[in-house]
Image (cartoon, rainbow, N blue to C red):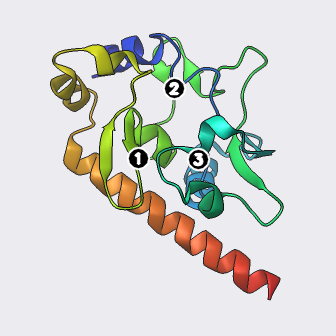
């Protein structure tokens, strides 16, 4: 699996390069617990490209000031956790959005694979995704986990503002 992921992570940069990855509070806790670091995220406003397939995404992930928490990128646009062999974070520590990519989704279900991802153009993309440790059942659970974490964070933020 590691060589498949290495090839995937370095192929075209659709997910690990030049993108912005939203982090839930749970993502921050998992990554901080694993790395001991807290300098891997920044607050940014969301550009139109990142609204995603879910029409409620902006409202769900942005704070009342329009900012949301994203992975910090190096000066060349790469994720700070990207190495020559792929992501240095174990699968169970990676941000939920990283685990779900290249699937597009909304609040209810997985929709399709992201057309910008090179895997989406492969005739055997389903078997490649399974080989990368991304069987559809796991991805569906990560999507549910993502929305549960977002919801908990929204409720906590609203209670804090009250």
Let me know if residue 91 appears in the view. Answer: no
Q: Is residue 99 left or right of residue 40?
A: left
Lower sequence index among marks 3 and 1:
3
Tag 2 near tag 3, CB within 8 Å: no
Mark 2 vs mark 3: which is more N-terminal? 2
Element at label 2: loop
Q: Residue at x 79, y 44 (%)?
A: 44
Query: Residue 83: image x %, image y %?
Result: 55, 17
Query: Which dot marks residue 92?
Result: 1
Give the class, few, some or many, for how many residues have Cα within 10 Å of label 2's Cα (few <14, many ≥20). many
Left or right of 60 on screen, residue 101: left
The residue that mark 2 highlights is 15
Question: Image check: 52 left or right of 79?
Answer: left
Q: Earlier in the sequence, mark 1 or mark 2?
A: 2
> In the drawing, does residue 3 fall left or right of residue 76?
left
Quadrant for the C terminus, please. Answer: bottom right
Residue 67: image location, x then y, percent: 78, 53
Nearest to the observer: residue 94 or residue 11:
11
Q: Nearer the viewer, residue 96 or 49?
A: 49
Residue at 17 percent across and 15 percent down: it is: 123
Answer with the quarter of the image where residue 9 lies: top left
Q: Are marks 3 and 1 in contact (CB under 8 Å)?
A: no
Closer to the eye: label 2 or 3: 2
- Whole-percent x and y of residue 64? 79, 67
Residue linked to disc 3: 31
């Amino acid at each position: 699996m590691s060589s498949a992921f290495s090839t995937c992570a370095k192929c075209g940069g659709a997910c690990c390069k030049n993108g912005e990855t939203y982090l839930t509070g749970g993502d921050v806790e998992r990554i901080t617990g694993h790395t001991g670091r807290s300098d891997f995220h920044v607050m940014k406003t969301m550009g139109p490209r990142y609204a995603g397939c879910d029409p409620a995404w902006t409202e769900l992930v942005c704070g009342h000031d329009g900012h949301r928490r994203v992975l910090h990128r190096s000066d060349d646009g790469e994720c700070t956790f990207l190495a020559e062999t792929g992501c240095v974070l174990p699968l169970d520590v990676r941000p939920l959005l990283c685990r779900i990519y290249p699937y597009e989704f909304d609040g209810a279900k997985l929709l399709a694979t992201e057309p910008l991802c090179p895997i989406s153009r492969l005739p055997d993309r389903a078997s490649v995704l399974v080989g990368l440790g991304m069987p559809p059942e796991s991805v569906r659970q990560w999507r549910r986990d993502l929305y549960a974490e977002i919801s908990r964070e929204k409720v906590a933020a609203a209670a804090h503002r009250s």
